[in-house]
Amino acid sequence: MPDFYEQDMVYISREHNCSKHLCLCGCGQMTIMPLDDGSKWWQLVEGPDGRVSFIGSVGNYSFPCQSHYIITNNVANFV
């Protein structure tokens, strides 16, 4: 994983079976999503064009922003 995280960019580590990104609402909080096999929260889906989607929404309810979104084809859709 990088030392610096860019806003609106989702980073995936196959070595660590996780995804990290700065909260997509723009608040800057680090969001970590475990992706190991059998994860009950998220499943990573990669399209042939390199775009990623996650099955399972991201609910950052412990953050001050309390954002909630779904990542589909590299786009965050807030719910």
Image: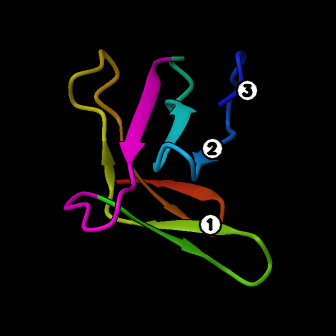
Counting residues from the start of the chain, the first of labels 2 and 1 encountered is 2
The residue sitting at 36% across, 57% down in the picture is 36
Q: Badge 3: few (under 14), some or many (20 or more) residues near its Cα, within 10 Å?
A: few
Residue visible at 33% across and 66% down in the picture? 37
Is 35 magenta? The answer is yes
Q: Please tell me whether the stretch drawn in magenta is mainly helix, strand or loop.
A: loop
From the image, tell me which residue sits under label 2: 10
Cα–Cα gap, marks 2 and 1: 9 Å
At horizontal 28% and vertical 28% (from top left) the residue drawn is: 66
Identity of the amino acid at label 1? Val
Q: Position of residue 76 (x, y in %)?
A: 55, 53
Q: Is residue 46 left or right of residue 4?
A: left
When the figure is inspected, residue 68 is found, relative to residue 57, above or below; the finding is above
Tag 1, which secondary structure?
strand
Q: Position of residue 7 (x, y in %)?
A: 68, 28
Q: Which residues are magenta?
A: 29-41
Residue 11 relative to residue 32: left or right: right
- Image quarter (top left, top right, bottom left or bottom right) of the C terminus: bottom left
Q: Quadrant of the N terminus?
A: top right
> Any mark on residue 6, and which?
3
Please state which amino acid type lies under the numbered disc 2.
Val
Q: Quadrant of residue 46?
A: bottom right
Picture quadrant of residue 3: top right
Q: Position of residue 40 (x, y in %)?
A: 19, 61
Q: Could you say whether the residue bearing mark 3 is in a helix, strand or loop?
A: loop
Q: Position of residue 69 (x, y in %)?
A: 40, 50
The residue that appears at 30% across and 15% down in the rendered structure is 64
Could you tell me if the residues under marks 2 and 1 are in contact, i.e. CB atoms within 8 Å? Answer: yes
Q: Specify whether 13 is left or right of 7.
A: left
